[in-house]
Image: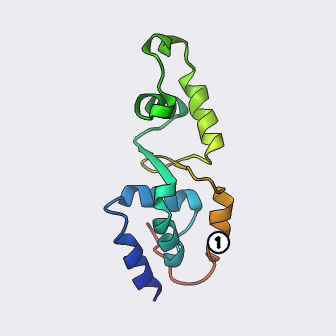
C-alpha cells in the first residue's frame, strides 16, 4: 500500500526528482509514506540547484524572483550573502546535495513535519 501511494504521488511531481530528493533531505525522511506526503506538498518548497553558499542564494533570488528585484545600479552596495543568510533563516532553508532547498508556505515547516509518520519503522527508500 505504501509503495503504491508513493508511486501515485510521484506521478504528480512531473520529473522534479532533484527537488523531491532535496526536500526529503531537508525533512530528514526516508520512509515511503513520508516521501509521498512531501511529494504532495512539493509546490510549497523552493529549490535552487547548484548553489553552494548564501551569496549565490541571494544573487539567484535577486536575479530570478520578481519580488526581490534590485536596481542594477545598487548591486555594488547590496549584501547578497547577508540577504541569502536572512532568506535561509526566514524560510527554513538548508544547503543539501545539489543545491539549496527552502520552505515557502503560509504554514510552518514544523506543522508539515509533525504530520509525518515516525521514521523508526516501516518501509524506507534508503538512498533517495
Where residue 95 appears, x then y in whole percent?
53, 45
Q: Is residue 77 above or below residue 5?
A: above
- Tell me the residue at 48%/21% (across/down): 70
Q: Nearer the viewer, residue 81 or 36?
A: 36
In the rendered image, which residue does mark 1 sit on?
115
Which class describes the residues within 10 Å of circle 1: few (<14), some (14-19), or many (20+)? few
Residue 99's image quarter?
Answer: top left
Whether 86 is drawn above or below 79: the answer is below
Q: Which image quarter holds the N terminus? A: bottom left
Identify the image quadrant of residue 7. bottom left
Instruction: From the viewer's perspective, tell me whether residue 34 is left or right of residue 6.
Output: right
Q: Which residue lies furthest to the left in this view?
A: 15
| Dot 1: element | loop
Q: Nearest the camera: 65 or 51? A: 65
Residue drawn at 38 percent across, 71 percent down: 10
Is 71 on the left-hand or right-hand side of 87?
left
Q: Residue 105: x, y in percent?
A: 58, 53
The picture places residue 84, in percent across and down from the top left corner, at 56, 33
51 versus 30 height, above or below: above
Say which quarter of the image contains residue 72.
Answer: top left
Which residue does the image show at 56% across and 84% down from the upper left? 122
Q: Where in the figure is residue 79, as x and y percent of width and height?
A: 57, 21
46 shown above or below 83: below
Outermost residue to the bottom: 1
Amino acid at each position: 500500500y505504501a509503495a503504491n501511494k508513493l508511486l501515485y504521488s510521484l506521478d504528480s511531481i512531473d520529473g522534479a526528482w532533484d527537488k523531491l530528493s532535496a526536500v526529503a533531505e531537508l525533512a530528514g525522511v526516508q520512509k515511503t509514506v513520508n516521501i509521498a506526503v512531501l511529494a504532495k506538498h512539493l509546490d510549497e518548497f523552493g529549490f535552487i540547484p547548484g548553489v553552494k553558499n548564501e551569496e549565490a542564494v541571494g544573487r539567484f533570488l535577486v536575479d530570478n524572483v520578481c519580488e526581490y528585484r534590485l536596481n542594477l545600479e545598487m548591486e555594488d552596495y547590496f549584501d547578497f550573502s547577508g540577504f541569502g543568510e536572512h532568506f535561509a533563516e526566514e524560510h527554513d532553508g538548508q544547503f543539501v546535495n545539489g543545491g539549496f532547498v527552502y520552505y515557502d508556505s503560509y504554514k510552518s515547516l514544523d506543522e508539515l513535519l509533525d504530520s509525518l509518520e515516525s521514521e523508526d519503522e516501516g518501509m524506507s527508500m534508503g538512498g533517495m
